[in-house]
Image: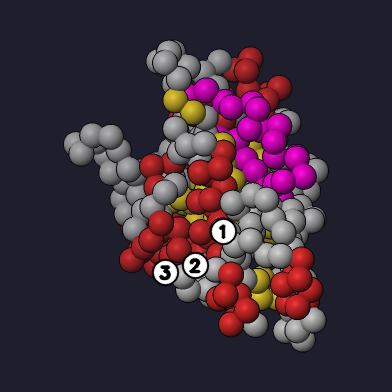
């Protein structure tokens, strides 16, 4: 089989990807004739030969026609009901994160989020508490019964963060950090992949493809908005991309990071409730109003 594939593919044949339906070999630039497809299909090791017309093979419905469902604790991403992920932008201490976790749980959130590693535009801004912050977040999650979501920025730190977090977040600045995508793909944890602020839909899905190709089928897409020209809106929600989540081409679960784009309260509910997951950030003033 490999000799047949090598005859039509320039360069080395990619390694098989282990998936829930068996091992898959993706040949993105290969042209397979009907005769060759018949020959491959007769081999005992080949279950199906499927032509795919998108660059993201594993993220499409061609191989997996059903919508991806990812269970985290009691929450199931991909079902009809929205999932609420809430918590502070950054973990700043034991008491504040525990207070935020209780407020998130009492408000109906199913997962707790908080940043321990903060990629900032300025090197002088608060960069987070690092692994100590992940430990504080994990304690707050355990105390309130909420699974935790937190960002990891470096491949070398993935095993340590994965040992404490239930979901690994890849931030928008790292959406195309390919060594990091491979590392979280091999970590065995669900991954929340945020869209880069200037990324196209294909670039976003191909970033997800890196995680899927590393053997991790539990990928959640997080739409955080794209950069606009007006600083009053900060980030603009790409509603056309949101509609494409339900198209036949895409199968991955998706989230809206509503704190990034919703500068006015009136904008939040109509758009947020249409998503499969709402991923929010709590400030101290909002925590106080929820009590």
Is any atom of residue 72 visible in this view?
A: no
- Choose between 21 and 275: the one closer to the eye: 21
Dot 3 crowding, Cα within 10 Å, few <14, some 14–19, many 20+: some
Residue linked to disc 1 = 29
Marks 3/1: CA–CA distance = 34 Å
Where the N terminus falls, by quadrant?
Answer: bottom right
Q: Is residue 160 visible?
A: yes
User: Which residue is drawn at the image coordinates 39% and 67% (left, top)?
Assistant: 160
Residue 146 percent coordinates (x, y): 60, 53
- The one nearer the camera, 155 or 210, is 210
Based on the displayed image, in which of its 4 quarters is residue 52 positioned?
Answer: bottom right
Dot label at residue 159:
3
Q: Is residue 248 magenta?
A: yes
Q: Between residues 213 and 147, which one lies in front from this camera angle?
A: 213
Q: Which residues are magenta?
A: 235-257
Residue named by callout 2: 10
Does residue 281 belong to the magenta stretch?
no
């Amino acid at each position: 089989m490999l000799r047949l594939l090598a005859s039509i593919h320039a360069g080395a044949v990619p390694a098989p990807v282990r998936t829930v339906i068996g091992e898959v070999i993706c040949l993105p630039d290969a042209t397979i004739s009907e005769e060759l497809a018949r020959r491959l299909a007769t081999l005992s090791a080949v279950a199906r030969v499927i032509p795919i017309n998108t660059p993201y093979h594993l993220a499409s419905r061609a191989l997996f026609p059903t919508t991806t469902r990812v269970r985290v604790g009691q929450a199931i991403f991909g079902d009809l009901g929205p999932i609420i992920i809430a918590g502070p932008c950054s973990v700043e201490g034991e008491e504040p994160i525990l207070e935020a976790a209780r407020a998130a749980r009492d408000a109906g959130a199913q997962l707790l989020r908080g940043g321990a590693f903060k990629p900032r535009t300025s090197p002088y801004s608060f960069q987070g508490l690092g692994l100590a912050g992940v430990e504080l977040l994990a304690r707050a999650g355990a105390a309130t019964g909420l699974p935790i979501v937190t960002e990891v920025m470096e491949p070398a730190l993935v095993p340590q963060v994965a040992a404490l977090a239930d979901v690994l977040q890849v931030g928008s600045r790292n959406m195309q950090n390919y060594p990091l995508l491979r590392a979280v793909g091999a970590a065995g944890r669900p991954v929340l992949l945020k869209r880069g602020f200037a990324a196209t839909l294909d670039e976003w899905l191909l970033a997800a493809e890196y995680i899927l190709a590393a053997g991790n089928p539990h990928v959640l897409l997080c739409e955080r908005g794209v950069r606009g020209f007006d600083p009053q809106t900060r980030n603009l929600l790409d509603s056309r991309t949101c509609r494409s989540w339900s198209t036949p081409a895409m199968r991955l679960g998706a989230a809206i990071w509503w704190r990034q784009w919703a500068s006015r309260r009136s904008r939040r509910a109509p758009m947020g409730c249409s998503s499969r997951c709402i991923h929010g950030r709590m400030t101290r003033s909002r925590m106080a109003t929820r009590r």
